[in-house]
Amino acid sequence: MTGRVYGRAGGSLEHGTFAANADVAKRGADGERRTAKILDVLTRSGVAVFHDLNMPGTKYAANVDHVIVSGNHVTIVDSKVWQGAFYWTLGGATFRGLRRFSARTRDGKVSYPAEKRTLPMARDLLAEHLGISPSKIRLALIIWPTGPKPLSTVFFRPPGSPKVINGQTLSAVEAGVRFGRKPADPHLVSKLATLLR
């Protein structure tokens, strides 16, 4: 039951349920698939990799992009596809260059995608679902740039303090170092499998 891939990366975005429009959904799904291609290599050492899980016990329309189980360690990974730019945070507000980083939602409202608390919420809900302390769950944010312009996140501080990683520089070897290479705990795997979409 361990050492394999569960779910399909980008599945929720293919239906456009979590994106402002079809173009954003396509880019997001591509980013999730790029992340999955790197993470899926970890299964060779017995690691379990989950893609596109339901958020447990919540009414919010949110999903968990990726979860890695190495031994009894759990890492939640969120994939993003953003313009190459200098991202930085001051007083809880995130800026892209000199402007606050914002986007339009489906209904035309302004949102602040880098300031969403989805990762810390996922950590708390998954910890409860798995019966472990939230402190036992690590968070990571993998960002893929939309084009050739470089991506800088040195001063970017998202909610929940995830490890921020530039997708273009992440290799399968580095992913193994960051997320682990041990055979997954079967108990954690079976609990997470109940959240597959």
Image (tube, rainbow, N blue to C red):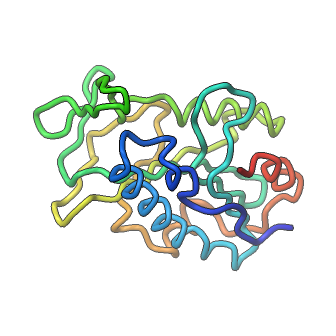
Residue 197, image x, y percentages: 71, 50
Residue 50, image x, y percentages: 68, 58
Given residues 42 and 23, the one toward you in this image is 23
Residue at the image position 70 percent from the left and 31 percent from the top: 125
Residue at the image position 69 percent from the left and 73 percent from the top: 43
Residue at the image position 67 percent from the left and 69 percent from the top: 181
Check the image and report above or below for 173 versus 52: below
Determine the residue located farthest toward the left in the rendered image: 98
Determine the residue located farthest toward the top in the rendered image: 91
Marks counted in the figure total 0
Given residues 110 and 5, the one toward you in this image is 110
Q: Is residue 20 left or right of residue 129?
A: left
Check the image and report above or below for 121 versus 22: above
Given residues 106 and 10, the one toward you in this image is 106
Check the image and report above or below for 13 versus 5: above
Q: Is residue 183 left or right of residue 178?
A: right
Determine the residue located farthest toward the bottom in the rendered image: 44
Residue 36, image x, y percentages: 54, 66
Q: Is residue 122 left or right of residue 183?
A: left
Q: Quadrant of residue 124?
A: top right
Q: Is residue 77 left or right of residue 130?
A: left
Given residues 180 and 5, the one toward you in this image is 5
Give the quadrant of the N terminus: bottom right
Residue 158, image x, y percentages: 39, 35
